[in-house]
């Protein structure tokens, strides 16, 4: 068993809507090993995305500890958490969330602007990331000039470019047709197997979950089942 | 600088809106540039007035005429170098729109005390020896295509001729320039001879509108001004004597406080602009909430997002300010041609610094509310479209 790169202990998350308190996550323990490709599954409202947001440092738990890559992130300030995210996490969203006014390469470069890399170094990293996702020839294209699958590849390149510890993907194939979805999932699998990236992916799609090494099922804010794909 | 492409691209997100907003700001800075140039030109006249010249008018108004005998009495006072009687002719050339200052002056004394008026000696002598002679500023001669030898008919606005006619015809005997080209606007005028004017006019003979006195010692201006006024105290024609600078300032004030008028106009323009630009910036940020949330997701700190939105506002206002001032620079020569006496209209360095200061302030005021909103954005809510 590899070392745990993500470790959650007694994590809960509550929201308050008006006078109503909503418990989104029940006290929850979770450990994800380095090099895992974990698929988080469950019905809508089961708390998958909330859990993903906590792991990715986008949100803070109401209680409990969140350790990622050996650092306890639930106690970091907003500024420190932002800096931590820029170094350790790459995000892939269902709707790609690319900046429409920027070309593919400029979108991919965004995380690198936060580093001290020179312009030439940034260009080299961007070219490599686009090559990994098979879009080197689309570098100058704007998102509106790309297909859904290509846009999601650009988003993956953006997630990869700063060489993060962890990739978190929220329904990365939710907006794609089956064939394109398989291509994207194949790409994520390659990143996991050949580049050793640890991936946590939220999905509704059982076929998508089959690409992962492990599956984790949630319901009503609790983990109900964990299984390994063969 | 590495964030510049990001800021620039954000401005290009909705080009028509950015262009229209930018043009609105540019127009405001065009007005700023033009009105400032006019204000400076007005004030410049007073600033560059001679320190060794006094102006004596009627005690209560510049329109109160003074008997010619005053000139002799002022001349006899100690410390006086020379005195020139002057009158406002107040006519126009061919059309009322062709208005410019015209003065009837005692030619030799007047030109003697204004060395900044430069014309060839031959033309100066011609003016001294031709009773119907006139000399005009080069800028006027260029505008109306006058040349020496021309007869210039002037329509009188105040002073008809003895025969009842309002048309005075002068012989153009000289065209003058100023020693310093910057002073051209101030000396854009026509000078005619006071002796001829006094003899030919229907009424007011033996009087002058005011007297210009050249001092032997400029530091005695205050004392001599008092002495002149004391000389005529309790007479039917009491006087008020000021330095030429104070006289010019007082004359300008009769037109109104130009500075206050200009500040009020610009204040209203920029105040309106705050709402227009502020609304546009708010709208722009509102539309980009998911994009800003993505930047925060990638690790852009709250402060950096704030700075990016402020940078956008700053870039837009600075570009617009430069555009506005450039337009003002191009428009000013035309404006100067429409405003006689203000041919020296230019955009000065203080105006440029002032514009840049206003642009920075404007960008901060209109950019801060949306920038704060962007800074406070909750990533999770924003990504979910809340």
Image (spheres, rainbow, N blue to C red):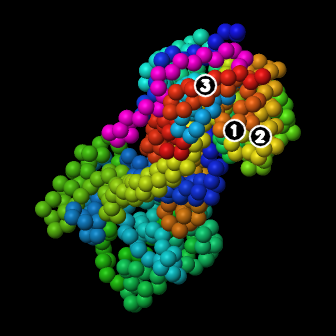
Q: Nearer the viewer, residue B352 or A77?
A: A77
Task: Mark 1 vs mark 3: tell me if same chain.
Answer: yes
Indicate the chain on which mark 2 is placed.
Answer: A
Of labels 3 and 2, the one closer to you: 3
Q: Secondary structure at mark 1?
A: loop
* Residue furthest left as drawn: B234
Residue B230 located left or right of residue A146: left
Q: Where is mark 3, residue-wise?
A: A225
Separation of residues labelled 3 and 2 (CA atoms): 25 Å
The residue most toward the right is: A137
Picture quarter with the N terminus of chain A: top right
State the residue in front, A156 or B167.
A156
Structural distance between the alpha carbons of marks 1 and 2 = 10 Å
For mark 1, name the chain. A
The magenta region covers A16-36
The answer for how far apart the CA atoms under marks 1 and 3 are is 16 Å
Q: Earlier in the sequence, mark 1 or mark 2?
A: 2
Label pair 1/2, CB-CB below 8 angstroms: yes
| Residue shown at the point (73%, 27%) measured from the top left | A212
Q: Disc 1 or 3, which lies upstream in sequence? A: 1
Q: Which mark is residue A205?
A: 1
A39, B200: nearer the viewer:
A39
Residue designated by label 2:
A181
Q: In the rendered view, does A31 fall on the left or right side of A22?
A: right
Q: Secondary structure at mark 3?
A: strand
Please say whether residue B183 is visible from this viewpoint.
no
**Does the magenta portion include A205?**
no
């Amino acid at each position: 068993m590899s070392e745990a790169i993500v470790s959650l202990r007694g994590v809960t998350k509550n929201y308050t809507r008006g006078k109503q308190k909503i418990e989104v996550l029940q006290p929850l323990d979770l450990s994800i090993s380095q090099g895992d490709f974990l698929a988080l599954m469950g019905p809508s409202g089961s708390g998958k995305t909330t859990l993903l947001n906590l792991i990715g440092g986008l949100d803070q738990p109401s209680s409990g500890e969140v350790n990622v890559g050996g650092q306890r992130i639930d106690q970091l300030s907003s500024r420190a958490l932002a800096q931590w995210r820029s170094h350790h996490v790459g995000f892939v969203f269902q709707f790609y969330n690319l900046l429409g006014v920027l070309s593919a390469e400029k979108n991919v470069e965004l995380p690198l602007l936060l580093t001290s890399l020179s312009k030439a170094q940034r260009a080299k990293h961007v070219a490599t990331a686009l090559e990994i996702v098979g879009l080197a020839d689309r570098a100058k294209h704007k998102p509106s000039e790309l297909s859904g699958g290509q846009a999601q590849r650009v988003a993956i390149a953006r997630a990869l470019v700063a060489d993060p510890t962890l990739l978190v993907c929220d329904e990365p194939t939710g907006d794609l047709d089956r064939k394109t979805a398989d291509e994207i999932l194949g790409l994520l699998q390659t990143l996991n197997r050949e580049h050793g990236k640890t991936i946590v992916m939220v999905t509704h799609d059982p076929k998508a979950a089959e690409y992962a090494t492990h599956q984790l099922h949630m319901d009503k804010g609790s983990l109900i089942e964990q299984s390994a794909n063969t | 600088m590495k964030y510049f492409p990001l800021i620039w691209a954000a401005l290009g997100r909705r080009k028509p809106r950015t262009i229209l907003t930018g043009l609105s700001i540019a127009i405001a800075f065009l007005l700023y540039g033009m009105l400032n140039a006019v204000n400076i030109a007005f004030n410049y006249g007073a600033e560059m007035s001679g320190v060794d010249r006094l102006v004596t008018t009627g005690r209560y108004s510049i329109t109160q005429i003074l008997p010619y005998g005053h000139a002799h009495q002022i001349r006899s006072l100690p410390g006086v170098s020379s005195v020139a009687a002057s009158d406002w002719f107040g006519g126009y050339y061919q059309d009322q729109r062709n208005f410019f200052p015209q003065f009837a002056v005692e030619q030799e004394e007047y030109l003697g005390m204004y060395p900044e008026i430069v014309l060839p000696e031959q033309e100066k002598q011609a003016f001294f020896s031709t009773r119907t002679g006139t000399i005009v500023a080069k800028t006027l001669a260029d505008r109306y295509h006058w040349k020496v030898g021309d007869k210039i008919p002037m329509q009188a606005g105040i002073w008809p001729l003895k025969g009842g006619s309002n048309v005075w015809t002068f012989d153009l005997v000289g065209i003058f320039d100023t020693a310093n080209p910057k002073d051209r606007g101030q000396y854009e005028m026509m000078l005619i001879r006071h002796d001829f004017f006094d003899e030919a006019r229907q009424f007011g003979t033996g009087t002058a509108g005011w007297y210009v006195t050249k001092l032997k010692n400029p530091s005695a201006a205050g004392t001599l001004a008092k002495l002149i006024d004391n000389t005529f105290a309790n007479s039917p024609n009491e006087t008020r004597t000021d330095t030429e600078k104070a006289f010019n300032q007082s004359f300008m004030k009769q037109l109104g406080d130009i500075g206050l008028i200009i500040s009020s106009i610009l204040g209203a323009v920029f105040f309106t602009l705050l709402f227009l630009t502020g609304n546009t910036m708010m709208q722009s940020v509102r539309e980009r909430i998911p994009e800003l949330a993505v930047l925060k997701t990638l690790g852009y700190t709250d402060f950096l997002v704030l700075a990016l939105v402020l940078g956008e506002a700053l870039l837009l206002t600075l570009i617009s300010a430069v555009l506005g001032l450039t337009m003002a620079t191009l428009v000013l020569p035309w404006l100067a041609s429409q405003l006689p006496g203000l041919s020296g209209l230019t955009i000065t360095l203080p105006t440029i610094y002032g514009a840049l200061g206003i642009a920075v302030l404007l960008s901060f005021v209109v950019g801060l509310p949306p920038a704060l909103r962007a800074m406070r954005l909750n990533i999770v809510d924003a990504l979910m479209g809340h």
